[in-house]
Image (cartoon, rainbow, N blue to C red):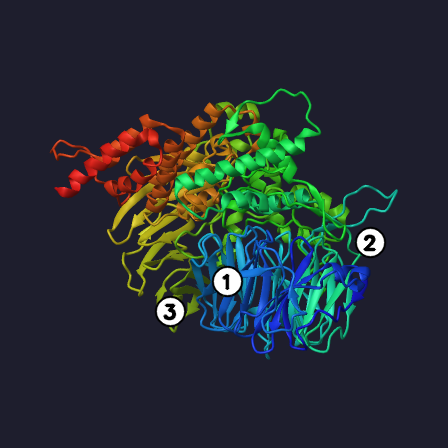
């Protein structure tokens, strides 16, 4: 390890609060105090890395200085694609910088002519929303969002595609918010504040996932910043300033259940900043040693007010290195180089330090593909990391279709030319594939892809591998990872928003407080998704599941964390979901103070085992399981539990069972707190489980009774008697849903006092297979949705009395559909609603590149049409008006782009309806609460963009005018 302090990096003696290295490793930015304003400086990395460059006067050290901030700058961050730099400061502003195209040095404003800017960076957006100092900014992994936090107690999420649009303001902290971090694929964002809490928010609906307070209870005294960090495998979130036995620590929070059993100990004063290395490492293989692969691990740097820096590997119990008194004042920020071997640290004393590690010290970094596989096993393929190459084609500044198409064609031409140049040297006489996708030949796409995934060398001679994409967000991007035979089933782990989704293989050694033991980034997907090729293994798995239930798997797992050999033996046991998932769910609900997710669309997890799975393969085909054979687990009674119903308005309920009263009879108490206002009531039997929404609160008790109360505590119905014990309970709006242990489902509308769904068996969707229910959803219209472990999701339609398939992860249509050109703009990715939650916000546009390469354009069209029609029908079935409109507009755009006049005319005809009213007309003027003719008005400008449809456009435009004039 080398340590150096380049003294030429300074703000003329003023503090430097932030440092960030550019993704390409050639430059870095610092932010802090200037003479009488905030100062952002961009420096060259070469003189830091090489001594000869430092001595060479022809190599510029400072590239650009920006003094636009009116007050001190607290944070500078490069976007992941390196195009933008965001800075936030005490002037309550966030400025977004981009390199200007024109060349030629300019002098720094107000300086002598010697100080010249080598690069031109100009402010392209100023983001105003915070009412106090901006403390931290963070780009989401796919660069679609920029988050900022402030002393005004809020976190603001900006639409990075359309600055200065605000997507959400996260309110919930009661103190100054001083740090932000995204998880590696943008599924969560975490914030840490002076209110002694760390909060994790879901990006699916921008609601609170969990609030962690215990490790911060003793935290007194304030730090200037609380820069927390998420590990690159997604398994650990490490906080700044926490306390353990009155000693300062950095708290390690496991993503699996948000457990807080471990921390980094040793600093003498509060931890101000933690930063994970972007790489995941594995132990360096010595020559001639066994080829047994070691567990991957992560590397984390911790900086503190005690002026020292420690670097930890998660496979060691002690820090790898500690450097005491590195600075004269507190450490303020840390940044790793993208290759994971260099680290820049800045301090309030106005200086920076650079540490250079060797691969012998840290280990071998995993390739982007291996990292991508870890992410897929943790998250599924539902959220994407887009590479820079794809961003250039997906960011659409102007929604007008014609201009967009012109730009698209121009880009394709450029790409083709580049491909031709590259291929010129290596071209063989291979026959040319004639298939076309969006006007670009498949061969070209393939070459471009292979060209993008290349290794480049940076100015200082270091290797840099262009990141692969991990999955798709609506861009139809492909990665070479999918060229191999990776199964396409989107792992439920990622797409379902359940906190059990990331089952960890090992329980980590919690006795040594400062250890991460031999923690291993879990490469194991949920048991339900594992489809063994041999049927026997599956049966063994089912038997093991019962075994696990009896033996309390925690013990098995803890005893197995001694050695890697034992871990291998424990693995078969851990495959069939470590515990029956419902037990996991109820434990989560009933831990005191563990807030549950937002009540609007809360998934619940439970396992149903159909006995046919245990029958032999031959029998299973001819015998379907008897109806009563489905058995669901029932919640375990507990002394007391708390459950958060919603975070906005803040509402939670507390249950206390068996409080003895004066008469000696045992009563249970239900308390509900809504924005500070409390009500309570008593029930005569023990409460097993509870659920609520902003309108109703419902509890299920031991004697098969179900009670429903209003939001203010009035009993709305006498207790409902269920025909069998409760398994899961759920509320949305005024709807209450009960799932019983014999797998029957009921939904009631409490306000109308009517049954929406009555004792409907899950037998229809579970019969004859060994799937389990992995998620339950109740939409705002009272429609129950069941997601199964095989990736299929069904909703029950009360008016048809049928179960309907609304989503299928293995659906080949979803994998072949390609409607990128029909997306209105990138915010289409951010479509949210029940369908998006069920499908995990995948848009699978051309999901598997290999399939596309051998698919004729006609088949591509047919699959895309079928997929879009499925999406529209599913949104209609779920009565999700927002998503129905979203998919209908994409469908219409696709019909226009591809020239399907016949279907387009039918669509317009249905939306227009009869111009002259007749009593016999069956036409409904609205669909899922939207006026059909208003939808037609939205479609007409889209139709007008294709000259082939001029007549259709004019015809319907005139009809609408006639109707308006009536």
Give the x, y percent position of residue 574: 64, 45
Left or right position of 295 against 142: right
- Of the numbered discs 3 and 1, the one sitting upstream in the chain is 1
Residue shown at 63% from the left, 61% from the top: 105
Give the x, y percent position of residue 552: 62, 51
Pointers 3 and 1 in contact (CB under 8 A)?
no
Which quarter of the rendering shows the C terminus?
top left
- The part of the image, by quadrant, that contains residue 835 is top left
Give the x, y percent position of residue 423: 66, 30
Q: Mark 2 points at which residue?
A: 360
Left or right position of 121 against 454: left
Q: Dot 2, crowdedness within 10 Å: few (<14), some or many (≥20)?
A: few
Viewer can see residue 487: no
Q: Residue 125 versus residue 795: which sits nearer the camera?
A: 125
Residue shown at 49% from the left, 65% from the top: 593
C-alpha distance separating marks 3 and 1: 17 Å
- Of the numbered discs 1 and 2, the one sitting upstream in the chain is 2
Give the x, y percent position of residue 651: 39, 64
- Of the numbered discs 3 and 2, the one sitting upstream in the chain is 2
Q: Mark 3 points at which residue?
A: 675
Pointers 3 and 2 in contact (CB under 8 A)?
no
C-alpha distance separating marks 3 and 2: 55 Å
Image height of 888 relative to 341, above or below:
above
Q: At numbered mark 3, what does the secondary structure look like: helix, strand or loop? A: loop
Q: Name the residue under label 1.
A: 594
Residue 172 - label: none
Q: At numbered mark 2, what does the secondary structure look like: helix, strand or loop? A: helix
């Amino acid at each position: 390890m080398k340590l150096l302090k380049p003294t030429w990096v300074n703000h003329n003696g003023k503090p430097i609060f932030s440092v960030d290295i550019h993704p390409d490793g050639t430059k870095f930015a610092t932010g802090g105090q200037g003479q009488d304003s905030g100062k952002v400086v961009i420096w060259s990395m070469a003189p830091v890395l090489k001594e000869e460059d430092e001595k060479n006067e022809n190599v510029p050290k400072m590239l650009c200085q920006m003094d636009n901030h009116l007050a001190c700058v607290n944070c500078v961050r490069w976007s992941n694609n390196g195009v933008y730099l965001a800075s936030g400061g005490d002037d309550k502003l966030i400025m977004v910088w981009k390199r200007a195209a024109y060349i030629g040095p300019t002098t720094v404003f107000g300086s002598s002519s010697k100080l010249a800017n080598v690069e031109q960076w100009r402010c392209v957006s100023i983001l105003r929303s915070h009412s106090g100092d901006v403390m931290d900014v963070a780009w989401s992994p796919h660069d679609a969002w920029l988050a900022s936090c402030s002393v005004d107690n809020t976190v603001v999420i900006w639409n990075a595609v359309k600055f200065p649009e605000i997507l959400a303001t996260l309110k919930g902290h009661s103190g100054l918010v001083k740090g932000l971090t995204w998880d590696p694929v943008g599924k969560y964002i975490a914030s840490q504040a002076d209110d002694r809490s760390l909060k994790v928010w879901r990006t699916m609906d921008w609601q609170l996932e969990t609030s962690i307070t215990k490790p911060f209870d003793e935290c007194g005294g304030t730090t200037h910043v609380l820069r927390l960090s998420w590990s690159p495998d997604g398994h650990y979130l490490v906080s700044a300033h926490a306390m353990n036995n009155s000693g300062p620590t950095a708290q390690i929070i496991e993503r699996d259940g948000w457990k807080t059993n471990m921390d980094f100990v040793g600093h003498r004063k509060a931890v101000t900043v933690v930063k994970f290395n972007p790489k995941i490492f594995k132990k360096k293989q010595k020559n001639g040693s066994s080829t047994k692969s070691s567990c991957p691990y992560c590397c984390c740097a911790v900086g503190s007010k005690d002026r020292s820096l420690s670097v930890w590997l998660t496979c060691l119990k002690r820090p790898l290195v500690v450097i005491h008194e590195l600075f004269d004042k507190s450490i303020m920020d840390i940044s790793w180089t993208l290759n994971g071997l260099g680290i820049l640290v800045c301090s309030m004393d106005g200086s920076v330090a650079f540490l250079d590690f060797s691969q012998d010290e840290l280990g071998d970094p995993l390739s982007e593909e291996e990292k991508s596989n870890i992410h897929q096993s943790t998250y599924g393929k539902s959220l994407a990391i887009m590479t820079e190459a794809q961003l250039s084609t997906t960011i659409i500044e102007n929604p007008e279709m014609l201009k967009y198409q012109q730009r698209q064609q121009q880009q394709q031409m450029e790409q083709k030319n580049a491909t031709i140049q590259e291929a010129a040297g290596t071209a063989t006489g291979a026959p040319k594939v004639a298939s076309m996708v969006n006007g670009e030949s498949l061969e070209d796409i393939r070459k471009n892809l292979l060209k993008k995934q290349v290794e480049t060398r940076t100015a200082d001679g270091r290797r840099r591998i262009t990141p692969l994409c991990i999955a798709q967000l609506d861009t139809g991007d492909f990665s070479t990872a999918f060229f191999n035979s990776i199964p396409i089933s989107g792992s439920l782990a990622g797409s379902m928003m359940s906190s059990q989704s990331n089952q960890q293989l090992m329980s980590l050694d919690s006795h040594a407080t400062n250890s991460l033991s031999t923690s291993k980034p879990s490469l194991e997907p949920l048991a339900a998704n594992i489809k063994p090729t041999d049927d026997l293994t599956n049966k063994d798995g089912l038997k093991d599941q019962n075994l696990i239930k009896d033996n309390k798997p925690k013990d098995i797992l803890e005893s197995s964390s001694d050695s890697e050999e034992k871990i291998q033996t424990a693995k078969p046991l851990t495959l069939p979901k470590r515990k029956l998932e419902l037990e996991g769910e109820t434990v989560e609900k009933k831990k005191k103070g563990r807030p549950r997710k937002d009540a609007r669309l809360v998934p619940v997890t439970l396992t149903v085992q159909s006995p046919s799975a245990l029958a032999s393969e031959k029998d299973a085909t001819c015998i379907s399981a008897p109806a009563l054979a489905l058995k669901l687990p029932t919640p375990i009674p507990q002394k007391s539990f708390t459950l958060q119903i919603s975070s906005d308005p803040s509402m939670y309920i507390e249950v206390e069972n068996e409080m003895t009263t004066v008469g000696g009879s045992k009563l249970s108490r239900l308390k509900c707190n809504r924005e500070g206002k409390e009500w309570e009531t008593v029930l005569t039997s023990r409460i097993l489980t509870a659920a609520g929404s902003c309108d109703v609160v419902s509890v299920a008790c031991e004697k098969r009774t179900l009670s429903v109360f209003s939001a203010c505590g009035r009993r709305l119905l006498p207790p409902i008697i269920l025909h069998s014990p409760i398994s899961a309970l759920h509320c949305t709006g005024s709807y209450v849903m009960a799932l019983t242990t014999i797998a029957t489902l009921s939904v009631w509308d409490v306000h109308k006092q009517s049954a929406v769904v009555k004792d409907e068996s899950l037998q229809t969707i579970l019969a004859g297979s060994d799937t389990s229910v992995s998620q339950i959803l109740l939409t705002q219209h009272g429609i129950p949705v069941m997601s199964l472990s095989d990736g299929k999701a069904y909703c029950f339609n009360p008016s048809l009395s049928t179960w309907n398939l609304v989503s299928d992860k293995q659906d080949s249509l979803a994998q072949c559909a390609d409607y990128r050109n029909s997306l209105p703009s990138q915010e289409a990715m951010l479509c949210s609603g029940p369908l998006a939650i069920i499908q995990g916000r995948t848009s699978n546009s051309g999901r598997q590149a290999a399939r596309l390469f051998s698919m004729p354009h006609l088949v591509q069209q047919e699959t895309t049409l079928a997929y879009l029609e499925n999406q529209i029908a599913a949104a209609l079935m779920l009565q999700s008006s927002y998503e129905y409109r979203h998919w209908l507009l994409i469908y219409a755009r696709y019909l226009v782009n591809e020239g399907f006049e016949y279907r387009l005319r039918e669509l317009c005809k249905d939306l227009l309806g009869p111009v002259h009213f007749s009593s016999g007309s069956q036409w409904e003027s609205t669909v899922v609460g939207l006026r059909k003719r208003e939808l037609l008005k939205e479609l007409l400008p889209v139709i007008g963009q294709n000259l082939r449809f001029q007549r259709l456009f004019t015809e319907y435009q005139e009809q609408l005018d006639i109707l308006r004039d009536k």
